[in-house]
Amino acid sequence: MSRSRSGDIENMLRARDAGADIVPPVPGFYTRPRTIDDVVDFAVGKVLNLLGIRHNLFAEWGGRESDIG
């Protein structure tokens, strides 16, 4: 993972202050991805969630270990 320069962080802060959502492509391992496609689906699904678009790329986590199978 590359380090962020202070200018990058300042630009993200400006974008956030202007109303942008900052969505780094960080995989959620609670979904237990098995392939690279699973990791990509998770990142895409998070963006779709922010846009209010329903999808079936991954199951939403309900907060209990039994929910993730």
Image: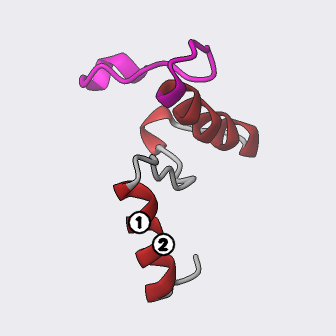
Bounds of the magenta segment: 50-69
Q: Is residue 4 visible?
A: no
Image coordinates of residue 68 in percent, x first then y, are 41, 23
Q: Quadrant of the C terminus?
A: top left
Q: Secondary structure at mark 1?
A: helix
Q: Which residue is mark 2?
A: 11
Quarter-wise, where is residue 33 in the image? top right
Picture disc at residue 14: 1
Image coordinates of residue 58 in percent, x first then y, are 56, 23
Q: Nearer the viewer, residue 45 or 64?
A: 45
Q: From the viewer's perspective, is 8 left or right of 10?
A: right
Q: Nearer the viewer, residue 69 or 3?
A: 3
Residues packed near mark 2 inside 10 Å, few (<14), some (14 to 19) or many (20 plus): few
Q: From the viewer's perspective, is 51 left or right of 61?
A: right
Q: Residue furthest left?
A: 64
Q: Which residue type carries mark 1?
A: Arg
Image coordinates of residue 26 in percent, x first then y, are 52, 53
Q: CA distance from mark 2 to mark 1?
A: 5 Å
Image coordinates of residue 48 in percent, x first then y, are 58, 27
Residue placed at 46% from the left, 53% from the top?
22
Residue placed at 53% from the left, 48% from the top?
27
- Cβ–Cβ under 8 Å for marks 2 and 1: yes
Q: Secondary structure at mark 2?
A: helix
- As displayed, is residue 18 above or below residue 11? above
Q: Is residue 30 visible?
A: yes
Picture disc at residue 50: none
Q: Main secondary structure of the magenta part?
A: loop
